[in-house]
Image: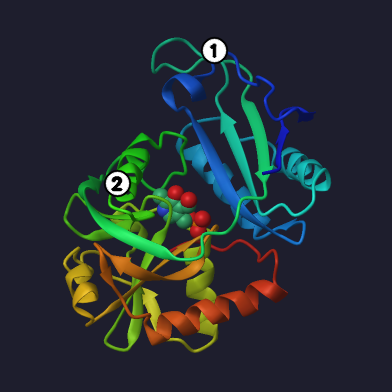
Amino acid sequence: MTTLVWAGGLRAEDEPIVTAQDHGLTVGDGVFETMEVVRGRVFALARHLKRLEYSATRMGMTPVDPEEVREAVGEVLAAGSGLTRVRITLTSGPGPMSSARGGGTPTLVVVANDSPALTSCRAVRVPWRRNERSPLAGVKSTSYGENVVMMEFARSKGADEALMANTHGHLCEGTASNVLIERGGEIVTPPLASGCLPGITRGLALEWGAAAGIPLRVAAPGELEMGVLDEVVAGDAFAAVTSSTRRVQTVKALDGTMLEPGPLLTRLAQVFDERAAVDNDPAPRRDR
Ligand SMILES: Cc1ncc(COP(=O)(O)O)c(C=O)c1O
């Protein structure tokens, strides 16, 4: 696999970058973005830069100049070919051995590689819950330990995504994806109030799907109970996940039960691919 690394300039893949006291390393005090690369260009870069700024602000970090990040991404992409994925990580930099943040220079790292796209989704439900009232709810923070535990649980069951409820027992999201449910002739997705990340793919799917006349909307808070996934297993509803590495992907198996793809979700996946092919960098919009 090709891996390219930028940290103040291009670096060797195995070169040490952060100090032992980097607060991102010691306590997960950082934010990140993972993006798709299509023919040498980042898909939806403006939206990802906007969310990076949002996440940094929510964490009380000093946001980095988006132009600096854009240039770093450009440098990495120009240095390789066949790249498929790029990740920006921004930490608060060196800090003390406690949760208190230091006043050090933030660490900015950009890494790109040519890892293959995830072509199908096998999901499981996990017994843990997303805290929608957490200060990090909806923030793309490097404090992803909970997601790691849930993902390992999924992997132990032969799955590649874990779907979770929030503290009210309402459907929330996956460890690295948002979730869409098709039932009763429409597609609904949990609201941001559920504690889910304002996914870039989710936002675009809502906009592009609506423009194509697909009935879809954001659910009212509490409308989608976790129990809706029982309906999916029973074949009375359908599920899909959305993320920058999956786009819109129908869930192929849930808790080991093979599922049929929902017709509206299949159409939405097509519409997404068609629109993405002609609009590589859609302008940012306010998420719902
Ligand atoms: C927790 C979580 N939810 C949702 C998503 C999907 O977001 P996006 O479509 O911006 O990739 C991600 C992406 O990794 C995520 O980590």
Disc 1 secondary structure class: loop
Q: Would residue 8 be visible to someone looking at this image?
A: yes
Q: Amino acid at mark 2?
A: Ser
> Callout 2 environment at 10 Å: few (<14), some (14 to 19), or many (20+)?
few
Residue sitting nearer the eye, 211 or 118:
118
Q: Give the labeled residue for mark 1.
A: 20
> Callout 1 environment at 10 Å: few (<14), some (14 to 19), or many (20+)?
few
Q: Comparing marks 1 and 2, which lies closer to the viewer?
A: 2
Q: Earlier in the sequence, mark 1 or mark 2?
A: 1
Q: Give the labeled residue for mark 2.
A: 156
Q: Residue at x 22, y 82 (%)?
A: 236
Query: Could you say which quadrant of the image residue 91 lies in?
Result: top right
Under 8 Å from ligand 1: the CB of mark 2? no
The location of residue 155, given as percent across then percent down, is: 34, 48
The location of residue 5, given as percent across then percent down, is: 71, 34
Residue sitting nearer the eye, 243 or 98:
243
Q: Would residue 198 be visible to someone looking at this image?
A: no
Query: Could you say which quadrant of the image residue 133 lies in?
Result: top left
Query: What is the distance, in whole Å, between disc 1 and disc 2 at their CAs?
Result: 32 Å
Disc 2 secondary structure class: helix
The location of residue 264, given as percent across then percent down, is: 41, 85
